[in-house]
Amino acid sequence: MSAHDNQPDQKRIVAYLAAESQMPTQDVAELYEHERAELATGAHVSKFVHIFAIRKVQGILHERAIGKQTLSAGGAPLLAV
């Protein structure tokens, strides 16, 4: 069994995240790859990097969705003081 056989299917991960967030697949793919690469840098064990990348991307997409809801609710977004 090669190391590639143990790697998660990145296309399925990106498709899932795009569907979940209702964002374009290409945007999610770029975000996922960026976060995965950052997490992999310096990682001693890379087997679970994709899991942490998924969680990070979900958080980022969730924050973006909240920001869009705030803007579409009318008025200016709330600013931290």
Image (cartoon, rainbow, N blue to C red):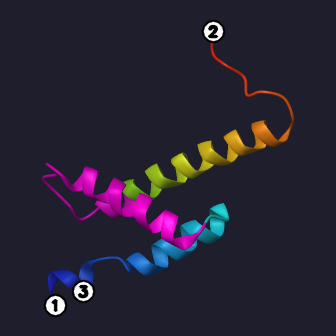
Secondary structure, magenta segment, majority class:
helix
In the image, residue 35 sits, relative to residue 50, either above or below, namely above
Residue at x-position 64% and y-position 71%: 19
Distance from Cα at disc 2 to Cα at disc 1: 55 Å
Helix, strand or loop under label 3: helix
Q: Which residue is mark 2?
A: 81
Q: In the rendered image of this protein, does residue 38 appear above or below residue 6?
A: above
Q: Residue at x 16, y 90 (%)?
A: 1
For label 2, the SS is loop
How many residues crowd mark 2 within 10 Å: few (<14), some (14–19), many (20+)?
few
32 displayed left or right of 15: left
> Which of the two labelled residues, at mark 3 and mark 2, occupies the earlier sequence position?
3
Mark 2 vs 1: CB contact within 8 A: no
Residues at circles 1 and 3 in contact by the CB criterion of under 8 Å: yes
Quadrant, the C terminus: top right
Magenta run includes residue 42: yes
Which kind of residue does numbered mark 1 sit on?
Met
Cα gap from disc 1 to disc 3, whole angstroms = 6 Å
The location of residue 60, given as percent across then percent down, is 52, 47
In terms of image quadrants, where is residue 5?
A: bottom left
Residue 23 screen position, x and y as percent = 62, 64
Which residue position is annotated with label 3? 5
Which residue is identified by label 1?
1
Residue 74 lies, in percent from the top left, at 87, 34
Mark 3 is on which residue type? Asp
In the image, which residues are magenta? 24-51
Distance of mark 3 from mark 2, alpha carbons? 50 Å
